[in-house]
Image: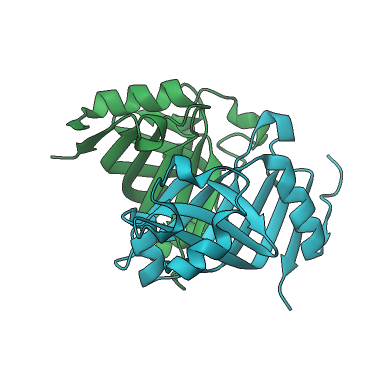
Chain colours: A green, B cyan
């Protein structure tokens, strides 16, 4: 089964699956890298808190294409989203995102808050396509593609 | 907060730690055009290699044929205190009957559930990773970071 999804359905699936996702990026040497992240949606954009000197930030500077796979359930339901990422370290963005966008307390990871955490930044992922799989795809696959 | 513990570890320590996370790991590959893919896969150790059984038509198989570089991140969870075990290296796609026969009985689960045609069927392959680097992070690195590199 292959069917079409809306972006709202993609967001709902991701939220229902898990707060955790695995973010894949590609380095300048074409080496993939994958790390767990705690993404949150703001409108149609996925935001991820990150360290400004992290591998994923260096990779995105070279190649903005990223993939996110939400943590699968025990029965293998999962969601993968591909998109284009940008890194934001400016104070206005940090102040805006610090409260009310993420569903966890960012101060736990950056106690200085938005004004005194110069090593903290945010990755914005603009989704381009997505695939939702039931039971690792054996129960069907549905897709979304940006128009 | 105390000083973050870091240092070198042996491959045997990486192997032992990897057993804590269960069978599911997230595999990241790159397409020929540089698009990343990441997906959960059941993995098993066969000697010093990490092996996954994959459908031949999966994107990750095409990706590995174009670019053998692979990154594997075992699933993180509260039960392992949010620790991470990450492996890097080149993966070989084993797509011959002889190669599949050699690996068929070594995955720890019944591959016939997914490939009734057995090791002779060309519709499945094995991806075999020989790690060259590993990093173990305790609680996202907050409690420590340990690295192994192949000599």
Q: Which corner quadrant of the image does residue A112 belong to?
A: top right
**Up-down: is A75 above or below B23?**
above
The residue positioned 50% from the left and 34% from the top of the image is A71
Relative to A28, A116 lies left or right: right
User: Residue A26 location in percent, x, y?
Assistant: 43, 62
Relative to A89, B48 lies left or right: right
Residue in the foreground of this view, choosing between B133 and A62: B133
The residue positioned 58% from the left and 50% from the top of the image is B43
User: Residue A131 location in percent, x, y?
Assistant: 30, 38
**Can see residue B128?**
no
Residue in the foreground of this view, choosing between B120 and B73: B120
**Up-down: is B106 above or below B94?**
above
Relative to B117, B137 lies left or right: right
Relative to A123, B140 lies left or right: right
Q: Which corner quadrant of the image does residue B96 belong to?
A: bottom left
The quarter of the rendered structure image containing the N terminus of chain B is: top right
The residue positioned 65% from the left and 36% from the top of the image is A109
User: Residue A19 location in percent, x, y?
Assistant: 51, 27
């Amino acid at each position: 089964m292959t069917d079409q999804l809306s972006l709202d359905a993609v967001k709902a699936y991701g939220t229902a699956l898990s707060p955790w996702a695995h973010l894949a990026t590609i380095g300048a040497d074409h080496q993939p890298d994958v790390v767990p992240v705690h993404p949150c949606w703001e409108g149609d954009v996925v935001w991820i808190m990150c360290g400004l000197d992290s591998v994923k930030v260096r990779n995105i500077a070279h190649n903005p294409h990223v993939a996110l796979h939400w943590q699968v359930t025990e029965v293998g339901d999962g969601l993968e989203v591909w998109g284009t990422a940008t890194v934001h370290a400016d104070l206005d963005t940090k102040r805006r995102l610090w409260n009310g966008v993420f569903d966890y307390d960012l101060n736990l990871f950056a106690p200085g808050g938005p004004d005194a955490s110069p090593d903290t930044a945010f990755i914005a992922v603009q989704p381009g396509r997505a695939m939702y799989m039931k039971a690792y795809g054996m129960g069907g696959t549905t897709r979304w593609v940006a128009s | 907060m105390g000083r973050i513990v870091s240092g070198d570890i042996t491959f045997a320590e990486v192997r032992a730690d990897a057993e804590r996370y269960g069978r599911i790991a997230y595999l990241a590959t790159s397409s020929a055009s540089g698009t990343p893919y990441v997906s959960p896969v059941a993995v098993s150790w066969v000697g010093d290699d990490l092996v996954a059984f994959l459908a031949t038509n999966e994107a990750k198989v095409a990706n590995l044929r174009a670019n053998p570089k692979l990154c594997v991140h075992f699933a993180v969870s509260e039960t392992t205190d949010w620790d991470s075990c990450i492996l890097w290296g080149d993966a070989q796609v084993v797509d011959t009957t002889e190669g599949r026969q050699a690996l068929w009985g070594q995955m720890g689960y019944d591959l016939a559930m997914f490939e009734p045609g057995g090791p002779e069927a060309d519709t499945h392959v094995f991806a075999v990773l020989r790690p060259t680097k590993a990093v173990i992070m305790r609680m996202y690195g907050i409690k420590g970071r340990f690295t192994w590199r192949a000599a």
